[in-house]
Image (cartoon, rainbow, N blue to C red):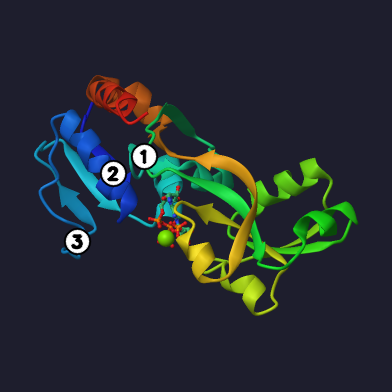
Amino acid sequence: MNQTLTLALSKGRIFDETLPLLEAAGIHVTEDPEKSRKLILPTSDPQLRVVIVRASDVPTYVQYGAADFGVAGKDVLLEHGGEGLYQPVDLQIAKCRMSVAVQAGFDYASAVRQGARLRVATKYVQVAREHFAAKGVHVDLIKLYGSMELGPLVGLSDAIVDLVSTGSTLRANHLVEVEQIMEISSRLVVNQAALKLKREKLQPIIDAFAKASLREK
Ligand code: PRT
Ligand code: MG
């Protein structure tokens, strides 16, 4: 059986925060995706290559076996559904939270108390739908692909559901966080068939990632 492995990562914080985990597994990525236009990067291990994809596409590449494993945020995995994926390790990287935010001055608590129907703009429609349904809040969800912060400022929506880490993006746009929905971190995701067929090569890397991520906690 061919034991060559493909790891799917996204550029930016996921790539940057996965590098130390790869180092812990004795693997060095020899090219910087920020400087190179290559989408397939070699590593110091001739049997391991990295493919650079959009953060929200990582689960899809792994689900279909185009990548054997990858790193994806819990936010991305909840929207994808996790079908065909084994999620052995919470890597404790790229941490943030998913929250509800509104324009400063909008009385969210009283709108909820009065049973108002809220317009909510978000990239995370699955999580948002479940969150508001569990609270018994009626919402019209507006799907966006980015810059959710703009929604309330231009009258597109009353609220947004977005990721928050330092809070500076919200502050810069006069928005306030009114509810935290969940903590977010990134997971290692593995193709279920690859785990069986390439276990000999994959398991030591999974173990090294698990051990290294314990230090991040
Ligand atoms: O950027 P692109 O559209 O290609 O995709 P992406 O935004 O999904 O990718 P990327 O690389 O930005 O994020 C990858 C993963 O990092 C996400 O899926 C999250 O699990 C995780 N993560 C951690 C974050 C953040 N922190 C974060 N702060 N993802 C996005 N943000 C954004 C947030 O959406 C908001 O616009 O940063 C802004 C808020 O940051 P603060 O520090 O101003 O609060
Ligand atoms: Mg981004």
In front: label 2 or label 3: 2
C-alpha gap between disc 3 and disc 1: 24 Å
Element class at badge 2: helix
User: Residue 80 appears at what percent x and percent y?
Assistant: 55, 46
Element class at badge 3: loop
The amino acid marked with disc number 2 is Glu
User: Which quarter of the figure is the C terminus placed in?
Assistant: top left
Q: Quadrant of ligand 1?
A: bottom left
The amino acid marked with disc number 1 is Ile
Q: Nearer the viewer, residue 170 or 86?
A: 170
Eyeballing the image, is 172 above or below 189? below
**Based on the displayed image, in which of its 4 quarters is residue 21 positioned?**
top left
Confirm or deny contact between disc 2 and disc 1 (CB under 8 A). yes
C-alpha gap between disc 2 and disc 3: 20 Å
Residue farthest along the bottom direction in this orientation: 154
Q: Earlier in the sequence, mark 2 or mark 1?
A: 2
Which residue is located at x 53 percent, y 39 percent? 183
User: Which quarter of the figure is the N terminus placed in?
Assistant: top left
| Residue 138 shows in this picture | no
